[in-house]
Image (cartoon, rainbow, N blue to C red):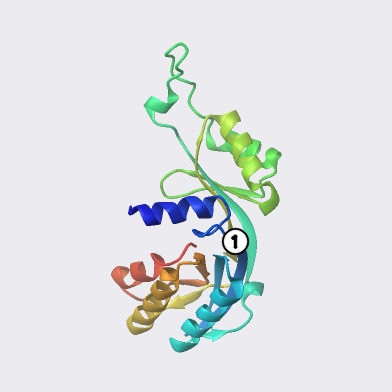
Amino acid sequence: MPKTSIDVAIARGQGRSETGAGLETATLEAMLAPSIAMVIDIESDNKQRSLKDLRHLIKRTGGTVTPTAFLFMRQGRTMLGHRSNEEDIDGSNGEVKEAAADFDEIMMQALDAGAEDVEKDEEENIVLWTQPNITHQVAQDLAKTTGLKILDSDIIWSCTSDKVKVDDEQTASTLAKLLSVVREYPDVQAVYANAERGDISEEAWNAVEEALDS
């Protein structure tokens, strides 16, 4: 990664821009064809400028800036996975830590800790859904009690309505291009949409999915 990119990433992690100015958060809502709702999380040292730029970008590519957040809800999402053999070694005595508890036991512990739902993904990782204000605490507590490793923990926009199927290759291509342009805007932190794969090729859908955070 270029030094300038590293400097920007470090600054953002400290809540400021590369110039040292404080960062503000904002959300932009939009509707894309065919009736796909989108929510964009922004972090900027000039919120009004960023919102103006993104509104123009969305309108220029055929989208409409309009309320869509009511189709989503803020949720905490944490992904926990098993540690590697090297990570399981206790440096003090060289013994391998006891294997993590089975899913039913993990689920009970997670629910007791405050999780609202617990599931497994395709790679057998544990996914916790929580209220945003307790996400990181639940993740830390469960990692400590189960021996699992926190792979990811964040606050996301989760779709609460029926998702819109993308059934046309041209629509998928147009959507992928728009999402890609939005993602390239430097102040955009995350992009969410209520789209799902319909009757299109895996390649066409991957181009859309790669630009989305959920």
- Of 102 and 190, nearer the camera is 190
Q: How many marks?
A: 1
User: Where does residue 108 sit, x and y in percent of width and height?
Assistant: 65, 37
Residue 142 picture quarter: top right
What element does badge 1 sit on? loop
Q: Is residue 38 left or right of residue 130?
A: left
Return the residue at label 1: 23
Question: Residue at left 49%, top 21%?
Answer: 98
User: Where does residue 32 sit, x and y in percent of width and height?
Assistant: 49, 82
Q: Is residue 153 visible?
A: yes
- Of 123 and 134, nearer the camera is 134
Q: Badge 1: few (under 14), some or many (20 or more) residues near its Cα, within 10 Å?
A: some
Q: Is residue 116 left or right of residue 144?
A: right
Q: Is residue 93 left or right of residue 129?
A: left
Q: Is residue 160 visible?
A: no
User: Where does residue 105 sit, x and y in percent of width and height?
Assistant: 60, 34
Question: Residue at left 59%, top 63%?
Answer: 157
| Residue occupying the far top of the picture | 93
Question: Residue at left 51%, top 34%?
Answer: 148
Question: Residue at left 56%, top 30%?
Answer: 146
Q: Please, is residue 113 above or below residue 165 in the view?
A: above
Residue 46 picture quarter: bottom right
Q: Please, is residue 1 above or below residue 147 in the view?
A: below
Type of amino acid under label 1: Leu
- Of 176 and 186, nearer the camera is 186
User: Where does residue 201 sit, x and y in percent of width and height?
Assistant: 30, 72
